[in-house]
Each structure stands twice: as structure tokens, then as C-alpha cells.
Amino acid sequence: MTDEDTMCSPNDKDLSLSPNLEITETCPSVKNILLLDSDGKRVAVKYFNEDWPTNSAKENFEKVVFTKTQKTNARTEAEIAMFENNIVVYKFVQDLHFFVTGGDNENELILATVLQAFFDSVGLLLRGNVDKKEALENLDLILLCIDEIVDGGIVLETDPNVIAGKVASNSIDSGAPLSEQTLSQALATAREHLARSLLK
């Protein structure tokens, strides 16, 4: 291998890394997104890493977070707290408690942006009627909303209008007019109607 084959030539600034220097560029990541009711019970939760390997560990974390935040006034704007070496950003509305958790090295503003995106998207999808009853009736939309915001812990989207639009387009039922369905949804509907007519 010659000097010409190396990534850094002698004329370049010394860009080589010493063995002790460690560069870590990471995407902002989220450990979990929680939606709990006013009693601390699960409405919708999704975990993106293995910090809590068992269901009981997850439930215990949820209980600790809920207990330590329930007396705060996070109704007008998001609050930030540290729990078990994690940053938790949270906000309450009606009888629902929204939480986003990141590592202790995550940027609080990014976590707050994810929380606000989740909060606003749910508000749009539930048409402003954000309470436990409505959330449980539309649980599929809320879970799709979480999937549109974060995938594998990586933040994908934070614009609530885009998120709600994607969720709404994925959730159009087969009873909707064909003009409101995507091509694949329309084909699935046509196959379903054909299968029903053949089985009669």
C-alpha cells in the first residue's frame, strides 16, 4: 500500500485518529414512549431498547415515573426530570399522561420535540377530544402514531400534521370510498369483495 492509497495524504491536515480518541456521532434516540392514564395504568407504550428486559421491569419503571411526576403541574407545558439515569420529558392532558424517555446524554430539546409531536399528533387524530376513553377507542391510531414518530429508537418525524396524515392514510378502512384509499388498499378491498361474492 502506497501513500497515494491512504485516506489522508501527508499534505492534508492530520485527520488520522489516535487510538485513544473516540468519535461517536449518534442520531438522537428515544428509549420509550409512554401513554398512561391518571392511575398510572398503561394506555399505549412502546420500548425501543433493552434497558428494561422484562415486562415487570417495564411496569416498575412506569410506576416509578408516574409516582414521581403525578403531583407536578405539567398541563400547560412539558416538564423534564431525571429517573434512573434517564431523561424523562412529560406532559399531561385530561386523564392522560404523555412521557418520552431518552438516555442521560440525550438533548432535552429533542426529547421535548418528540413529546410535543406525539402530543399534538394524538390531539389531531382524536380531533381535540384527548381523554382515556377516546384514546382506548382509537388505540390503533395512537400505536401507528408512535411508529411514525420513532422507529427502533431513532426519531423519524416530528411534524404532527405529517404524522397524523400518514396515520390517517394507513388507517382508512375498507368501507371508505375507493377515492379515499391508496391503490394497495383499493386492491385489497376489491379482493375482499370478490372473495365474499365467490363464497356466497
Image (spheres, rainbow, N blue to C red):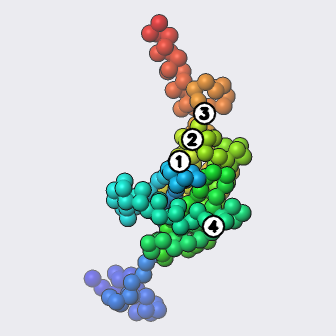
Q: What is the three-letter code of the residue carrying label 3?
A: Ile
Q: Nearer the viewer, residue 91 or 49?
A: 91
Regarding residue 145, the answer to whether it shows in the image is yes
Rendered residue at 42%/56% (across/down): 59
Answer few, some or many: residues within 10 Å of disc 3's Cα (few below 14, many 20 plus, some between 14 and 19): some
Disc 4 element: loop
Query: Are the residues tagged 2 and 1 within 8 Å (C-beta)?
Result: yes
Q: Nearer the viewer, residue 198 or 142?
A: 142
Residue 36 in the image: above or below residue 174: below
- Left or right for 150, reference 169: left
Disc 2 element: helix
| Between discs 4 and 2, the one toward the N terminus | 4
- Spatial CA distance of label 2 from label 3 is 18 Å
Q: Which residue is mark 4?
A: 72
Q: Which residue is mark 3?
A: 172
- Spatial CA distance of label 4 from label 2 is 24 Å
Percent position (x, y) of residue 19? 32, 88
Rendered residue at 46%/9% (across/down): 198
Depth check, mark 4 against mark 1: the one in front is 4
